[in-house]
Amino acid sequence: MDAREMKIKAAEVALGHVENGMRLGIGTGTTAEEFVRLLAEKVAGGLQVNGVPTSERTARLCLELGVPLKSLDESPELDLTIDGADELDHSLRLIKGGGGALLREKIVAASSARMIVIADESKLVETLGVFPLPIEVNAFGLVSTRIMIEKAAARLGLSGDLTLRMAGDQTFKTDGGHFILDASFGRIADAEALAMALNSIPGVVEHGLFINLATLAIIAGPAGVQTLQAH
């Protein structure tokens, strides 16, 4: 299987967890988009769901393919969210935000009774941090916020470049109008401590460490599909 085939296989298994009438959070990214395409086929066949998208990009794809949507305000408590990840470990801690939707993704995941992560096996790691950690920040006080992040990381023995994400020659802006700093910390030995440290910085809107949110991971590889349960 190539990478896309593995994403489709994981999405197929995840679709088996979707029940008629569910309030469903729908993630962002290439793996989540494969799930949306499969979900749309089921909807066309009569499956009833209310989808809550985690980004404008996902919303556009759902509307194009006929998946019915509601806002999170209209459906504030969800049964299930299905989303991808840029990286995950065996304890189902995640790094997300490579697509720039981490704030909405985390709000939707936290509003859900369950979160299923779908990924190809290249995303499964022993320790988080190979993928740069996205940190969504307010545009106001950007330099100050960057310095505070560097100091907080240093207290945890972490260092590395904090790169302002760009879109061409313009600063990348999230759906909420914020900037993203991609932090190349390398191996993050204590993800919980880093999450707490980042949460305490006023200019940090949200960060891409998703801890205690995923309940199940469906991971596809050349040898087949494996599942990991939160414990």
Image (cartoon, helix red, strand yellow):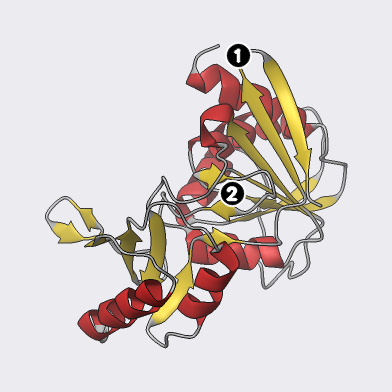
Q: Is residue 123 left or right of residue 131?
A: right
**SS of the residue at dot 2?**
loop
Using the image as rendered, state which of residue 93 and residue 206 is in the foreground.
Answer: 93
Using the image as rendered, state which of residue 95 and residue 42 is in the foreground.
Answer: 95
Q: Residues within 10 Å of mark 1 (few under 14, many from 20)?
A: few
Which residue is label 1 attached to? 222
Residue 27, disc: 2
Q: Is residue 115 left or right of residue 160?
A: right
Q: Is residue 164 above or below residue 130?
A: below
The residue lying at 48 percent from left, 72 percent from top is 206
Q: Quadrant of the N terminus?
A: top right
Hey, which residue is sitting farthest right in the picture? 20
Kind of residue at disc 2: Gly
Q: Decide if residue 113 is in sight here.
A: yes
The residue lying at 41 percent from left, 46 percent from top is 131
**SS of the residue at dot 1?**
loop
Kind of residue at disc 1: Pro
| Mark 2 and mark 1 residues within 8 Å of each other at the beta carbon | no
The residue lying at 41 percent from left, 45 percent from top is 130
Residue 204's spot in the image, x, y percent? 41, 78
Residue 8, disc: none
Residue 59's spot in the image, x, y percent? 53, 51
